[in-house]
Amino acid sequence: MRSNALTRTVVSLTAVIGLAAGTVAAAGTGFAASQPAAKPAVSAQDVSVLAVNNLGLSTQRAKNWQCWLRDRGYSPGTIDGQLGTNSWKAAQRFLNARGHNAGTVDGVVGPNTIRALQRYLNLFGDIFGYHLDVDGIAGPETRSAFSKFNATGC
């Protein structure tokens, strides 16, 4: 959730700065030929897809998740503690194979992937002391549960 708020803030600030710059430029060129509208440098979709999304895990706990996936036959690529596209594709394949419906195997940590992860983590809720709402939001409870799940490993 914090990531989405940050993304919206960055996109909003970019828009405000762009509008302000356009207004200042327009004041001096009121009679000049109009220019085509500039394309935004970054779209909201581009900003929302992160190259690495550890969902709050430390590097060691992310390595634990990568080893855990690898040990179950789902190759996350290099075990480096950076949950990038390959790690999340492996997780999505794992979650889909277990019937948790992560959706398309694309390596993007969207709501379907989060819901599937929440369903899977809930299988261990009695052990770790949580019950997650399956809402597709990687909020504090989901991040904490994911961290607890990955406390031990390789």
Image: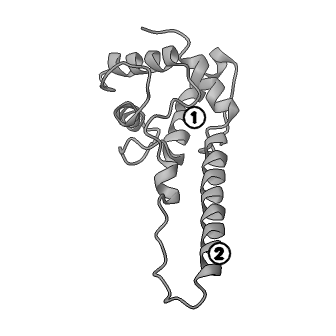
At label 2, which amino acid type do we have? Thr
Q: In front: mark 1 or mark 2? A: 2
Distance of label 1 from label 2 (alpha carbons): 46 Å
Query: Could you say which quadrant of the image residue 123 lies in?
Result: top right
At a point 66% along the width and 68% down the height, the residue shown is 20
Q: Which of marks 1 and 2 is nearer the N terminus?
A: 2
Q: Position of residue 59 (x, y in %)?
A: 50, 18
> In the rendered view of the protein, which quadrant contains the C terminus?
top left
Element class at badge 2: helix
Residue at disc 1, secondary structure: helix
Extreme-front residue of the structure: 28
Which residue lies at the image location 52% right of the left edge and 9% below the top edge? 152
Q: Residue 23 carries which label?
A: 2
Relative placement, left or right, of 142 versus 51 is: right
From the top left corner, tell me how far across and down residue 78 is, in percent.
Answer: 31, 22
Which x, y percent locates residue 94? 38, 31
Identify residue for label 1. 118
For image coordinates 46% across by 53% down, the residue present is 46
Q: Is residue 76 above or below residue 136?
A: above
